[in-house]
Image (tube, rainbow, N blue to C red):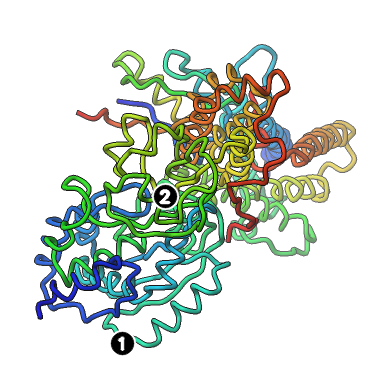
Amino acid sequence: MSAVAVARRWDERGRLLAGVDHGRVPGFSRAELLAEIEASGLTGRGGAAFPTARKLAAVARASRPVVIANGTEGEPASWKDKVLLAESPHLVIDGVVVAARIVGANNAVLAIGRANRRVLGRLSRALAARSDRIDIHIETVPDRFVAGEESALLHVLEGGPAKPTLKRPYEHGTLVQNVETLANLGLIARYGAGWFRERGTPEEPGTVLVTVLGAVRTPGVVEVDLGTPMRDVIQRVGGLTALPQAFLVGGYFGTWLSAHDVLDLPLTNAALKPLGAALGARTIAVLPQGACGLAESSRVARYLAGESAGQCGPCVFGLPALADALETLDVERLRRLAPQVFGRGACAHPNGATRFVASAVDVFADEIEGHRVGRCTGPAHPPVLPLGASSDWR
Amino acid sequence: MRSLSDPAVWYLMRGSGLVALILFTSVVVLGIATTMRFRPARMPRFVTLGLHRSVSLLAVVFLGIHIATAIADSYAKVGVAQVVVPLPSAKYGLFLGMGALSLDLIAAVVLTSLVRRHLSQRVWKGIHWLAYASWPVAFLHSVGIGTDKASGWFVDTAVACASAIVVAVFWRLLALRRPYPKYLGASS
Amino acid sequence: MKLRVNPILCDGYGHCAELMPEHVELDEWGYPIIRGEAVGRRLEPVARQVVKMCPRLALSLEKSAR
């Protein structure tokens, strides 16, 4: 039976989380592999959706390239990477090996957050059971929100704090790729671009891991085709447990959208773009009627302010100011703050925070009016959005 | 060409040394003022930085004269090696060595500042902090070397310089109470 | 030539805005907002001074793209 036919048999159960054994990476040349990745249209699964083939080509030009598998997942509301690493560590490592072959690296690092003991255990055992030609080792990094940012990851692996720098890793011979992207890379090398493109949409091919939390029966990680309608994604996690008020799409750097705008949308960047949203790292939080969107947003805004690396003035001062203004319902101040904060740091942190707060003010405009006259939709509702808790940078 | 035992050389050495001390004191105070975002009376802040840099170069010139005359002067009996290598001497005890040490520290600070573009911020800053060490060493050299202990004007000048430094350093330490890291970033 | 600031090195001294108000404004916390346009020929020497007078060497002059 052909490889693709084998693939199609377990394909029904999903690709990345199907519990499939890893396989020997076929002996294609660098150029052949790169061409296949390009044909597949694979884009980064870490949130930025950058074309993977282009990144690989850029790093392949370096003299001593290194591959870093980014499994840090500093976003508290996202746990797709942890699930992937725990359930299919070999798929990820296969991808690392393929990526290393394409860029010509002899060394690779699997970067995960320090607190993930379970993932660390699974990954260590998987690595010990293999004998790949390249040298792969595991590095744990602080559990900060920005620690997974490419340059921050490079910084901490070079011995510095987990804080972003102005160094772009791919300009310094370092390939930083999300673990989900790498898992897909490994599969494309075995089964081909055509197989990969059988799922998803022509413009956004493939399957993706999505974390769904909030007012759903079984919050968790599911693998769906890109282009799946939001309703179906919700069904996969057991359906709604309450009438939805709003959806947070894209995690804490994402955008709030009213429930009725989102339920029938296909899960693609193309569909979200007109609403000013993007998939990001595909974290979807369902806020039920009966919870207060402003309270949730305030907590997250305060958390994001605390997660600033503290390197750039507009972020250090701007994010607490945004959180303050949100708490005091000072919409005018928020409008004045936004252009002073957005785009004025060294990384995307202030941008994401500004976008998040702006979307909260937009979607929860009625709630703001209510609060002004002393009414709140969900004064006693338990928190829906989780926050992180680390405090060190090294 | 004056002879090496001409008293003018001796007086020039002491005079330029004192001027250097006053100028370096000003440089340290101006450096602290720059960091503290001091705004001189209705003048823009960059003036403080400009003065800090200009005065430091002037101070180096006077330091150069002080060292050259010290070596040239036959009564002072200072060898070239003693100028750069801090060692105790029979004639001056530890105090000539302190002059050499302060010269080494000042040289490190000034030279790294001249090539700052080629250094990382951390390296440049780490060496620049040696300035805080260079001043007390230079001060001890000035008062301990014994050439002007008795003169009233020297003592007054030394006290004035020391007071200025104490006040400036105290002012600088106050800023450490503010939250890290952008504690001085507010446009006050 | 365009004036650009390294936001990590910048510590809000504000010398740049004092020297070149035509191109640099300060936000409410004292950090520079630099206008996107290129510095004209006439102001290039001033721009070079601005780069030198930053206590953190956070500014640089770059060739405008295209």
Q: Which is nearer the N-term, disc 1 or disc 2? A: 1
Which residue lies under the disc numbered 2?
A234
Which residue lies under the disc numbered 1?
A131
Identify the residue at horizontal 90%, vertical 40% (top origin): B150
Q: Position of residue B37 (x, y in %)?
A: 66, 28
Identify the residue at horizontal 62%, vertical 25% (top origin): B48
Question: Quadrant of the image for the N terminus of chain A?
Answer: bottom left
Q: Position of residue A288 (x, y in %)?
A: 56, 40
The front one of A105 and B150 is A105
| Quadrant housing residue A320 | top right
Identify the residue at horizontal 54%, vertical 69% (top origin): A116
Identify the residue at horizontal 30%, vertical 42% (top origin): A266
Up/down of C38 relative to B4, above or below: above
Would you call the spot at circle 1 few (<14 residues within 10 Å), some (14-19), or many (20 or more)?
few
The front one of A266 and B114 is A266
Q: Is residue A368 left or right of residue A108?
A: right
Q: Chain of mark 2?
A: A
Q: Is residue B81 left or right of residue A20?
A: right
The front one of A270 and A143 is A270
Question: Quadrant of the image for the C terminus of chain A?
Answer: bottom right
Up/down of B94 relative to B131, above or below: below
Element class at badge 1: loop
Q: Is residue A285 left or right of residue B33?
A: left
Would you call the spot at circle 2 few (<14 residues within 10 Å), some (14-19), or many (20 or more)?
many
Q: Amino acid at mark 2?
A: Ile
Q: Amino acid at mark 1?
A: Ser
| Quadrant housing residue B66 | top right
Is the residue under label 2 in contact with that under label 1 (CB below 8 Å)? no
Count of numbered badges drawn on the protein: 2
Q: Position of residue B58 (x, y in %)?
A: 59, 32
- Between marks 1 and 2, how big is the CA–CA gap? 40 Å
